[in-house]
Image (spheres, helix red, strand yellow):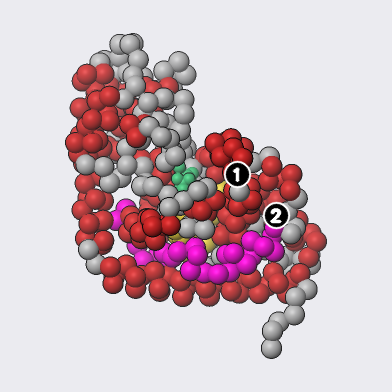
Amino acid sequence: MSKKRVLSGVQPTGNLHLGNYLGAIRNWVTSQSEYENYFCVVDLHAITVPHDPTKLAKDTYTIAALYLACGIDLQDSTIFVQSHVSAHAELTWLLNCITPLNWLERMIQFKEKAVKQGENVSVGLLDYPVLMAADILLYDTDLVPVGEDQKQHIELTRDIVIRINDQFGQKQKPVLKQPKPLIREEGARVMSLTDGTKKMSKSDPAEMSRIEILDSPEAIARKIKRCKTDPQKGLEFDNPERPECHNLLSLYLLLSGKTKEEVTAECQDLGWGQFKPLLTEATIEALKPIQERYQEIMGDRDYLETILREGREKAELSANEVLARVKSALGYSTPL
Ligand code: AMP
Ligand code: TRP
């Protein structure tokens, strides 16, 4: 039996933080040998909010290098850049024309981001989930490993598939394959260091709110030292009145590799002053090998370019085939 297909992606907007790592990439790495994987750097999504053209290409390479540095293995996985495979933009147009506008207006992420853009909110931001659906559907994807915040977008993708198959498929021969989200409970929602009720985010203006994968040990120590805590004695998981406590213990659990029981036993009688150095040490140690590997990869531009070229070639095989299938189902003629 052939392996199930996995596809996921991260936007090249700012550096990756612990939420991206623990909520997404680390899970891709852990399960990659079970699946046939496609991991793209979604640079078309990156321009749905105002962007800096002098940084886009560099940030795209950075994310691709971080995928490799975090342990994505080319034996099991294909790494590529979304804009290098033109089928993504083309399928988006076709899907746009069968997606009702009100489905997009309901999206939580759109509503949240649109508020921040005011008058300048672009059509692209509204259309973001359709582009994401195209990313997923072009690879006949079975599973999409993401953090909790992306679940609604995958549900929308599933609704689009039902609609296309209903309108343009035959019973025995659906046009598109139905994907499912793959959301791990642990790490699915890493919260901000300055507010345990808000998720850690690239777009938070407060740099102290997130630890980035490429942060220096000094920066990590400084951010943890100043992060928000509470005045209560003893540390515990799962107390809704203590969101920061739950978040910091969860980070410690994930980064140290210890179990919940071990962390509970170790930390239940600690004060913040004793706990923070433990978390700092575990974070620095967990990120160190990734940072070292990242420097090596970035030092060899040819290597990275070769990987992305081969990735594009491999991705195009699937993407062009699915695109042709959709065009034919919608009634387009094939150019001679
Ligand atoms: P983005 O930063 O929006 O490009 O997200 C890339 C991936 O990281 C997606 O799978 C998100 O679900 C995941 N992610 C982003 N922020 C967090 C967070 N705070 N906690 C867990 N996962 C996250
Ligand atoms: N929207 C996703 C995010 O911000 C990124 C993304 C784009 C994605 N296309 C995708 C994730 C396809 C999974 C599959 O997190």
Image side of residue 230 versus residue 285, left or right: right
Segment colored magenta: 68-96
Residue 16 located within the stretch drawn in magenta? no
Q: Residue at x 62, y 70 (%)?
A: 322
Question: The residue under label 1 is which amino acid type?
Answer: Val
Work out how far the residue at label 2 is from the one at label 1, CA to CA, in angstroms. 24 Å
- Mark in front: 2 vs 1: 1
Q: Secondary structure at mark 2?
A: helix
Q: Residues within 10 Å of mark 1 (few under 14, many from 20)?
A: some
Does any atom of ligand 2 lie closer than 8 Å to the CB of label 1?
no
Q: Is residue 286 above or below residue 259?
A: below
Q: Residue at x 46, y 33 (%)?
A: 199
Q: Secondary structure at mark 1?
A: loop
Question: The residue under label 2 is which amino acid type?
Answer: Ile
Residue linked to disc 2: 160
Residue linked to disc 1: 121
Camera sees residue 286: no
Q: Position of residue 234 (x, y in %)?
A: 30, 14
Residue 71 located within the stretch drawn in magenta? yes
Q: Position of residue 32 (x, y in %)?
A: 41, 57
The outermost residue toward the front is: 119
Q: Residues within 10 Å of mark 2 (few under 14, many from 20)?
A: many
Q: Position of residue 69 (x, y in %)?
A: 29, 56
Q: Residue at x 33, y 11 (%)?
A: 231
Q: Quadrant of residue 87?
A: bottom right
